[in-house]
Amino acid sequence: MSNAISLTGVTKQFNGTRAVDELSLSVPAGSIYGFIGPNGSGKTTTLRMIMHILLPDRGEIEVLGSRDTAAARDRVGYLPEERGLYKKMTIRRLLRYYGRLKGASISDIDAASDYWMGRMELPGLLDRQIETLSKGMSQKIQFVAAVIANPALLILDEPFSGLDPVNAHVLKDAVLEMRQRGATVVFSTHDMATAERMCDRIFMIFRGRKVLDGTLESIQSEYGADTVRLRTSQGAAALVDMPDVEAVNDFGQLQEVRLKGDPQAFLARLAARASVYHFEVTRPSLQDIFVRIAKP
């Protein structure tokens, strides 16, 4: 499979601090590729370099088979983390503006506008002014602006941030449709559950350096099967002072426990102090792996 994006030894500094440090990665064409990492880790800087909004101090970036910065103009759609639309424009005029920037014809833009407005559950609103829209509606319009010219590469920076569950579901389905159309989708997120469910591959950057890159299965395999999920009559209190407990993620009704011993021996000791209603040996979640890496 060819790559939609290739980075080789990319470095970017701001005021002497390396925001991105010798980063190399490959994004397979046609995949959904998740970018994760703590705030300030270098995610947005990396995305902006891929978009050629920023240029690297060192290294090479290839987008859609080209190192020419023009490659990211007409065939790439971008939803920035900092949302911003021209508030005095109507939706129709805004979408025509963005579509023409990508070289699309007015007739193609209008047809795509009608389709995507229905897809986003906003039919009949093309002549509404942007300033009259709710936050969720504006965010969906910004997504439509990013896909209006049917890009080969779609880059979404925190696309689900601030959306209610209904709108997040609509946007999730739209992202999957773009992949079905053949687009490569790259998105950054702090929602580990969304990354687990949607991404073919996951990349994590921490302090400017790559620390994870692979499928969810390969990443979880790397961290072993040292985690159990359990529910007991005493909740997290049943785990106090147990020597083989390394860390506990308490969800109230259920606890996710990282062990440093044999799970069956741990279960026997746990059953001696509480009634055990659920006990499951599992691989660590992406959330747990993220915390292991990023926690100070």
Image (cartoon, rainbow, N blue to C red):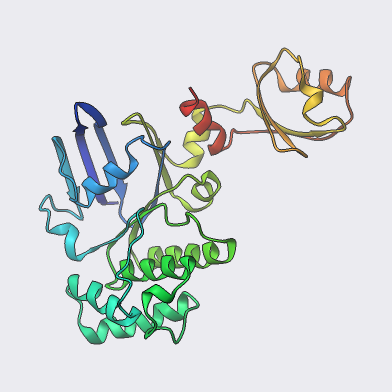
Q: Residue 104: percent from the left, percent from the top? A: 20, 77
Q: Is residue 292 left or right of residue 255?
A: left
Relative vertical location of residue 215 with respect to residue 118 in this rendering, above or below = above
Which image quadrant is residue 32 in? bottom left
Residue at point 86%, 24% (across, down): 271
Q: Residue 290: percent from the left, percent from the top? A: 50, 33
Q: Is residue 287 left or right of residue 8?
A: right
Relative vertical location of residue 119 with respect to residue 280 in this rendering, above or below = below
> Toward the viewer: 46 or 261?
46
Q: Residue 144: percent from the left, percent from the top? A: 36, 71
Residue at point 10%, 53% (across, down): 68
Q: Residue 291: percent from the left, percent from the top? A: 52, 30
Q: Is residue 166 left or right of residue 184?
A: right
Q: Is residue 238 left or right of residue 177?
A: right
Please give the count of numbered marks on the rendered protein: 0
Residue at point 27%, 66% (across, down): 151
